[in-house]
Amino acid sequence: MDIASTPSLDLAHGEQMLALCKQLYPICRSLTGDGFRQSLRLLQQQVPALQMHEVPSGTQVFDWTVPKEWNVREAWIKDPTGQKICDLAVHNLHLMGYSVPVHCRMPLAELQAHLYSLPEQPDAIPYITSYYKERWGFCLTQQQRDALIEGDYEVYIDSSLTDGSLTYGDLLIPGDSPQEILLSSYLCHPSMANNELSGPVVTMALAAWLQSLPQRRYSYRIVIIPETIGSITYLSRHVAAMKARTIAGFVVTCIGDERTYSYLESRLGNSKADRVAQHVLSHLQPDYARYSFLARGSDERQYCAPGIDLPVCSIMRTKYAEYPEYHTSLDDFSVVTANGLAGGFLALQQALSVLEHDAYYRATVFGEPQLGKRGLYPTISTKETTHIVANMMDLLAYCDGQHSLLDIAERLNVSFFTLLPIAKNLEAHQLLSRSLQPTG
């Protein structure tokens, strides 16, 4: 892989990712079930090598058990006038996730115990689930709830909770080294554009880009799962190989808005992934939001858990739970944009490019090389000369075989991608030798 300059924003690519998000948006997904499978098949159309796997309900995965499979076909409430409200066909957030089947009539006072709304966001439908305790419920805006009239309501949920399976997708893209970089995203939330769809869509775009490269230094493990139970299930099957091979990893979520960039550190905050994430984001947006592992809330909890200890952090746009539309029907395409997705893709593409190209350079001559005779230094000296070649001279000053290009970029406070073409040019002129490990 040859990168002569910084990977740049590609708005057309963002439009393609946005189109896929809009295809996925109407599908009713959950931890398990046909909606997840349907969504995963759409991702397979983008990356056909993505494999689909099924893990039976009841399977023990570490301290957890794979739950029953949930599917829903129809759900609604009819008010005393016979008008449908909270209709799953209108918006799939209207139904509490994993609701058990029910068909009954009840007065408004009794129904209220099964309704969920957000008084502080009166025009938003909340996202509510009950994965591990059987119950049923409906979600509606506070405005809708306030307008309910007294009388008897008919409740209908045509759902099933049966022994089935949990579905996940994965792909291993081989590189020159068996050492791996992990990209993990989740696909279990219904109809929320940033919290749900931006992550897997950007992950698939990254997988397609990685596959297109003529050469890869590292291998890449791509994982699409239901959040939490999915990462636990995946680790229960692959933890030994992942612990032995993973050198860096990123949870890809909330990566599609234009508001900011964010980073959530790994459990100890000192992995190569942490360093790369901080470096890339500091040059994309110097005032990016940085979060402690104590603010975790996604699958980094599982990948960084004691005993697993994978070097995984998160690169995001606006972090989950930090934007007002989070976990509501307002998380739509007023939040996620083509430009936001393109920017999220760019941040992760740069992070992966740094990992691919970081190396240790050693000067091949004693003292400062004569650059002028090689056409690398201006032959007329002026007060501007030093400024013009400062990065090249500073790079040479630290090419001792003990400092990686990322080390030097951080010391000089310049982008890795400013130094990369300079280092390649000096190597082409045989003034630097390159190694993947420190040299004495």
Image (cartoon, helix red, strand yellow):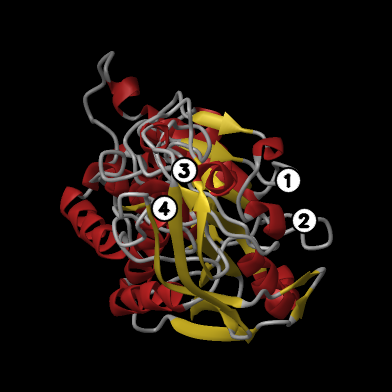
Marks 2 and 4, Cα distance to the nearest angstrom?
A: 34 Å
Q: Which residue is mark 1?
A: 267
Image quadrant occupied by the C terminus: bottom right
First along the sequence among labels 1 and 2: 1
Mark identifier at residue 94: 4
Q: Is residue 85 above or below residue 330?
A: below
Circle 3 SS class: loop
Nearer the observer, 362 or 67: 67
Mark 1–mark 2 distance (CA, rounded to whole Å): 8 Å
Q: Residue at x 47, y 29 (%)?
A: 288
Could you tell whether 265 is left or right of 361 in the image?
Answer: right
| Element marked by disc 4 | helix
* Residue that carries the numbered disc 3 in the rendered image: 126
The crowd level at tag 3 (other Cα within 10 Å; few <14, some 14-19, many 20+) is many
Q: Earlier in the sequence, mark 4 or mark 3?
A: 4
Q: Secondary structure at mark 1?
A: loop
Mark 1 Cα shell of 10 Å, populated few (<14), some (14-19), many (≥20): many
Residue lying furthest front = 151
Which residue lies under the disc numbered 2? 305
Under mark 2, the amino acid is Ala
Q: Which amino acid type is marked by label 4?
A: His
Q: Can residue 176 be seen in the rendering of this structure?
A: no
Q: Are marks 1 and 2 in contact (CB under 8 Å)?
A: yes
**Which of labels 3 and 2 is toward the front?**
3
